[in-house]
Amino acid sequence: MTRNFLAIGECMVEMAPTGEGTYRLGFAGDTLNTAWYARRLLSEGWDVSYLTGVGRDSVSEEMLAFFEDAGIRTDYVQRDNDRTVGLYIIQLNDGERSFSYWRSDSAARQLARDRARLDAALAAADVLYFSGITLAILPKEQRGGFLEAVRAARNKGATVAFDPNLRPRLWETGEAMCATVMAAAAVSDIVLPSFEDEATYFGDAGPTETVNRYTQAGVPLVIVKNGPGEVLWQSDGATWTFQVPPVTEVVDTTAAGDSFNAAFLASHLQGTDLETSVAAGSRLAARVIGRRGALVDISQAV
Ligand code: ADP
C-alpha cells in the first residue's frame, strides 16, 4: 500500500543573481526543500505531497508545475483568488548574500484557514513534516487550530516530524516563537533542531541541553544538528553522537538542515536504524553545502 509523506509550509519565488546583472527565477522554501529531497530518496511505495497555498496567477501555475515536475503531489495545494505566492531576492555584496522578502500576505499564510480541509489532508498522511516557519507564517489565531489538527492526525497513527527552524523576524515576539515551538514539539514524534539557533533563542549552553529540553517536552526522538559539529540524538532514554563527515569547501549552506532532515527521514521511515539514518542525513547535507543553491541534483544514491 502506498504511504503518504506530507510536508506543510510555504514555497516562495526565489530571484537569484546570475552575476550578469539579471536574476534567475526559481522556487524554494524550507519545507519544500525537504519534500523535494524526500521525493528523490523515498521509494516508489511513497507519495510525497506538499500542503501550501498559491494564487491563480501564472507564477503560481509555474510553481505548481515545478512541484509536479519534481514528483511532488499537489492535491493539497489550496488556490487563493485574492493572493499570490511570496517572493525573495538574493543580492550579492562582496560575496555576502543578503535577502529581501515579500511574503507578508502570501497565499500560503492561509493554509490553515479552512480547518475541515486541513483535517482531511492531515488525516490522509502517514507522515507529517512541518517547521517553525510553517507556524510563523500562520495568523497567530490559527496556530492553535493547526497544532490541534496535527495532534488529531498523530492520535490516528501519523508520525509527526518537526524542525523548529527558529526565525524571530517572522514572529511577533521571541516569546511567542519559543512558546509555539515547544507546543509543536509536544505533538511531535521527531524533532530536528539546529543547535546554533536553539542556543541563541532558548539560551541552551550545549546540545545536551537542547536534547533534554525537547525530551522533557515529551518528544520520543530528538536529533540535534550542529553544523560541522557532531549530531547528538536521544531516543528511549539513551543518547548517541555521530561525527559528520568533514567538508573541505563549503560553498553555500542553504538547505543544509532541510536536506539533512529529508535524508534522515527517508532512511528512518524506510526502516533503517537511527545511526545509519543520521549518517545518511549528514552525507546528503555535506553534498548540498558543497554546491550553490538549495536544490542540488542528487541523481546518485546517497
Ligand atoms: P541549518 O542549516 O538548519 O542551520 P546546521 O548548520 O545545523 O543546519 O547543519 C545541518 C547539517 O548539515 C549538519 O548536521 C551537518 O550534517 C551538515 N553541515 C552543516 N555545516 C557543515 C560543515 N561546515 N561541515 C560539514 N557538515 C556540515
Image (cartoon, rainbow, N blue to C red):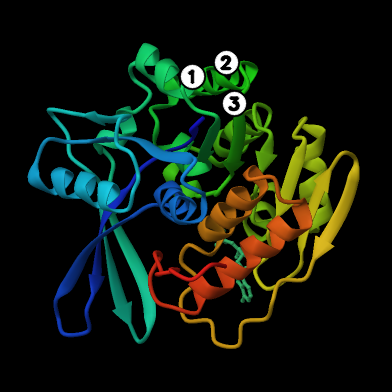
Sequence-wise, which precedes: disc 2 or disc 1?
Answer: 1
Residue under the point 54% across and 23% down: 150
Q: Gap between marks 2 and 1, in whole Å?
A: 8 Å
Q: Nearer the viewer, residue 144 or 232?
A: 232
Q: Are marks 1 and 3 in contact (CB under 8 Å)?
A: no
Q: Please state if 30 lies on the left or on the right of 232 as rendered.
A: left
Q: Please state if 70 lies on the left or on the right of 266 as rendered.
A: left
Residue under the point 29% across and 36% down: 74
Q: Gap between marks 1 and 3, in whole Å?
A: 8 Å
Residue under the point 41% across and 69% down: 296
Task: Specify few, some or many for label 2: CA neighbours under 10 Å numbering under 14, 14-19, or 20 or more.
Answer: some
Q: Amino acid at mark 2?
A: Ala
Query: What kind of element bears circle 2?
Result: helix
Residue 250 picture location, percent across and down:
53, 81
Q: Please state if 14 lies on the left or on the right of 270 as rendered.
A: left
Q: Please state if 14 lies on the left or on the right of 178 as rendered.
A: left
Q: Amino acid at mark 3?
A: Ala
Residue 102 in sight here:
no
Eyeballing the image, is 187 above or below 231? above
Residue 302 in sight here:
yes
Find residue 158 and name its label. 3
- Provide the residue designation for mark 2: 152
Residue under the point 77% across and 71% down: 243
Q: Within 8 Å of ligand 1, the CB of disc 2?
A: no
Find residue 123 and name its label. 1
